[in-house]
Image: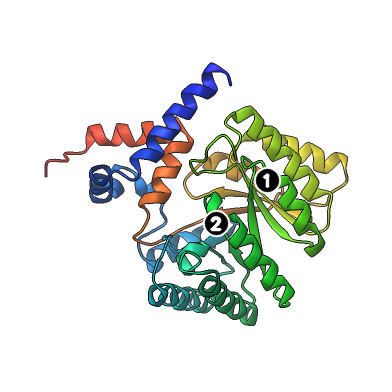
Amino acid sequence: MGLSDAVNRVFRNGILHATTNPVVRRTVERYGMQLGAARFVAGESLDQAIQALRRLEDMGFKTNTTIFGEHVFDEATADAVADEYIRVIDRLKAEGLRTNIALKPTHLGLSVSREVGYRNIRRVVEHGAKVGTFVRMDMEDSPWVDGTLGIYRDLREAGLDNTGVVLQAYLYRSEVDLESLLPYAPNIRIVKGAYLEPPDIAYPSKADVDRAYIRLAERALTADGYTAIATHDRRIIEHIIDFAIANKIPRDRFEFQMLYGIATDLQLQLLRRGYTVLISTNHGTGWYPYLMRRLAERPANLLFFARNAVRLPLSK
């Protein structure tokens, strides 16, 4: 690992460890929206998010939305989250939006039990199938990978094909996981990975993660299915474009996915070049863990927050 990688890892680990600090949490939750969280959060309510979703669709982007939240540990709360996702799907349809759904399995009960998680996720996916809404299960930290992939396989075996899953390039296991999913002709989102993982299960070097990302993307693109290239890394994006052209992979077999409020110039450039671009446009009050992962990913995001902190009279 080079010096730059080591510095970035220390920076990233520091931010992610701070996520569990109660003082940091209280401060960020109190002042975060004023400090700049609103740049990355479409709204604390669905009504606010719908305004952002409509604006993005009018510009030509695809969209999805997630209700912020994760790691629910009681069944009743998990059931209520599934009910809320069903209401979100119905509201989006009533608004005439084509927005897809992305959800975290632990938010719907995987952290209670595999059975509760599957039951609730299946309810949401089945409701989505009735109205033509695609539902993707996000991938969380490594203890939940097996459960998430197992639920995905069970949903596909049950005949539900309006669902997809995510693979994280920094996990050593992801290439094997991809091969195991290819018989389903899956809709796969490929990400680098945003959680704090030990070096015995995840690449510690950014260069190794980037190479793994490209291997995953190329393999997915040359197999059956649909591939979502989820990254803001311009070098990787251009590599994928060149690879797709060289291998005659049509543009309707893949899309680029980016986060709301990040690299907006790049989002527009890809859209103008004729590529499908989906913007993940999340909403809800439980935005704190999501925001901290965004700050950990790029020093520029933390600097953006720090500049706003200097301007904000926090004593009020």
Where does label 1 land, which residue? 173
Q: Earlier in the sequence, mark 2 or mark 1?
A: 2
Locate the N terminus by quadrant.
Answer: top right
Q: Amino acid at mark 1?
A: Arg
Relative side of 1 to 295, left or right? right
At horizontal 55% and vertical 40% (from top left) the residue drawn is 265
Relative to residue 178, is residue 165 drawn left or right?
left
Q: Give the residue displayed 39% in from the left and 50% down from the top.
A: 289
Characterize the local packing of mark 2: few (<14), some (14-19) or many (20 or more) Cα atoms within 10 angstroms: some
For the residue pair 313 and 84, the one nearer the viewer reads as 84
Marking on residue 144? 2
Q: Amino acid at mark 2?
A: Trp
Query: Percent from the top left, x then y, of residue 142?
Result: 55, 49
Query: Which quadrant is home to the C terminus?
Result: top left
Residue 182 visible at all: yes
Q: Position of residue 132 (x, y in %)?
A: 64, 76
Q: How many numbered marks does the figure carry?
A: 2
Image spot of residue 5 (x, y percent): 54, 24
Residue 34 visible to the viewer = no
Circles 2 and 1, Cβ within 8 Å, touching? The answer is no
Residue 250, given in percent of the width and then of the height, sits at 83, 52
Identify the residue at horizontal 64%, vertical 34% (top origin).
209
